Image (cartoon, rainbow, N blue to C red):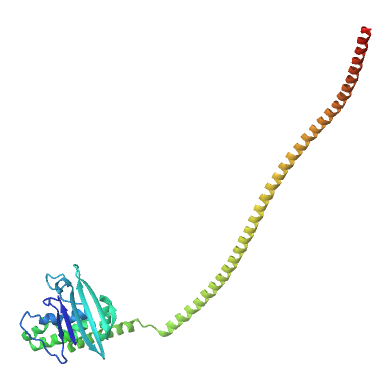
Amino acid sequence: MTRVYLQNYRVYEEPVELEIPPGLVGIYGPNGAGKSYLVESLRFALYGRSRTANEEVRTANVKADCIVEVEFEHEGHLYVVRRTITGANAGMRASAFADGMQVAEGVRDTTRYVQSILGMDDTSFRASVFAEQKQLAAFSTQPPAERRRLVLQLLGITPLDTARDNARRDAREADTRHQQLRALLVDVAHLAEQVESSEQAAAVLVEAAVTDEIEAAAARQRAEAAATRHDRLDLVRQEHVLLVAEAKAAAADRDRTSTTADRLAAELAALDAAATRLDGLSAMAEGWREAEARLRLVEAVVAAAAVV
């Protein structure tokens, strides 16, 4: 770690920026000065974890953003991780920078990026690097064996006696399992015969399945051919129905035409008879006109004789 910046973080309401010198081994000060909070801010910045809720991480009665930023060097690169608690709901934002360039944005992405750089998650960080104040205070009141257990717990190392007991338990379980497997073993030759018999039965079943598949394929072909013939017959039937309908329509037209022809022939015969009668009447009318002319001539002669 090379730098820590705090603002509105627990007791650090005013902005605090600390340059961490190389080889720092301790931070001292009066009780309540915020030494533990300063150390806890490292875990909060890197992993977003705290032993209290976010509302308690932000300085009490302060509505402004809580900002925690740490700067550290790793394998020749300078990293900056920032986490912010903001808003009435104490929402968290996070971002990470490497050599001045932003490489992560968001709470989850930033945490995953920190884990990939440091090679440890929050649990491993607490076990190997970060120990809470109460865990260290327990050393002063515990006997040596218990202090050894606490150290191993902090380092995340399983005690040797526990590992030994686990190994013995695993060995017993393995031996029990071995005995169970031996009890389940049967004659290998008998199994081979069963396998051969099963293979022969499987071959028969495969052959039967192939035969059934061939027959099924032939049946599908016959069904498809029958369906094709049925479709063709259906088309022929439809065409036959259309032809019958057309024939009926043609017969009806023919009947109507024949009736019309008969009617026209009768009318033509009537017209011929009327023409004949008209010719006779015309001759009679001509005779009447001649008789009328002679009558007028006679009347004229009679009238002339009467005058003389």
Instruction: Choose top left, top right, bottom left or bottom right for residue 65.
Output: bottom left
How far across and how far down the image is residue 185, in percent? 36, 83
**Residue sitting at the far front:** 308
| Residue 289 falls left or right of residue 175 | right
Q: Is 294 left, or right, of 21 in this rendering?
A: right
Identity of the residue drawn at 11% across and 81% down: 36
Specify the quadrant that holds the N terminus: bottom left
Q: Residue at x 78, y 37 (%)?
A: 261
Quick one: 30 or 237, which is closer to the camera? 30
Q: Is residue 253 above or below residue 141?
A: above
At 25% from the left edge and 75% from the top edge, which residue is drawn? 107
Position in image of residue 263 (x %, y %): 77, 34
- Image: 184 above or below 307: below
Q: Could you say which quadrant of the image residue 7 lies in?
A: bottom left
Check the picture and name the quadrant holding the C terminus: top right
Residue 109, image x, y percentages: 28, 78
